[in-house]
Image (cartoon, rainbow, N blue to C red):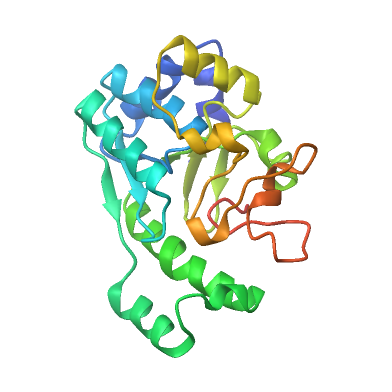
Amino acid sequence: MDIAAIKKQLIGLDLVAQLALLADLFPGKIVFSTSFGWEDQVVTHLIFENNLPIRVFTLETGRLFPETYYVWNRTLEIYRKPIEAYYPQNELLQEMVNAKGPNSFYESVENRKECCYIRKIEPLKRALAGNEIWITGIRAEQSPNREHMDNLEWDEGNQLVKFHPIFDWSLEEVKAYIKQHHIVYNTLHDKGFPSIGCMPCTRAVKEGEDFRAGRWWWEDQSKKECGLHVS
């Protein structure tokens, strides 16, 4: 796939036109993954409000916040568009919990990565299978890991192209867009949660703390990623 050629076609287009172009270039093989955070709600609005032929899915880990489920449900009610849920494989999850208990991820990095794999990575593989373009809502400033990424890039692990339409947006731009278009969002963001994942693994951050400080806060490591967006 000639990513450079695709990039040239995207130059000068607004976000809706960029998404529409990719949907036209890869009909039926373009998907967007949402976790119902600020950024994902912006991209969901762009897709649903403009009736773009892009399939939207989410990873239902089974351990999400009540506020996340509320946003999910309200998004369905507002746009009347489907959001497909991908669940962990029952046998894998059952085996892990039976062997190590429901909170084994607190005990070691290895256990946490195992939980992330079962609840997120493996379902993601199934959701992406057969597709050629994966759209995300990630932004460059969200994590040091992401500063070297590009808004259109090859994902070697999943063997497809990833497109991050709001990659260069600031958080203030995201908030302004949400306010301007009256987009429903997760109220945990107003309570100090910049990044919202599974409830046992996410906490609010203090003023001045790193963006990712609220994720897997008990781990002593500089790069905190579950593996979904590691290049």
Where is residue 38? Give x, y as percent.
50, 31
Q: Is residue 167 above or below residue 156?
A: above
Q: Is residue 154 above or below residue 77?
A: below
Where is residue 92? Give x, y as percent.
36, 78
Q: Would you say residue 194 is visible in this rendering?
A: yes
Name the residue nearer the viewer: 20 or 197.
197
Name the residue nearer the viewer: 167 or 62.
62
Q: Residue at x 35, y 47 (%)?
A: 58
Where is residue 103? Give x, y as percent.
51, 75
Q: Residue furthest bottom?
A: 99
Where is residue 61? Give x, y as percent.
39, 60
The answer to whether 128 appears left or right of 110 in the picture is left
Q: Is residue 70 above or below residue 46?
A: below
Q: Would you say residue 169 is visible in this rendering?
A: no
Q: In the rendered picture of this protein, how many numbered marks are placed on residues?
A: 0
Q: Residue at x 33, y 34 (%)?
A: 26
Q: Is residue 168 above or below residue 55?
A: above
Q: Residue at x 55, y 10 (%)?
A: 12
Name the residue nearer the viewer: 71 or 47.
71
Q: Residue at x 69, y 59 (%)?
A: 217
The answer to whether 47 appears left or right of 217 in the picture is left
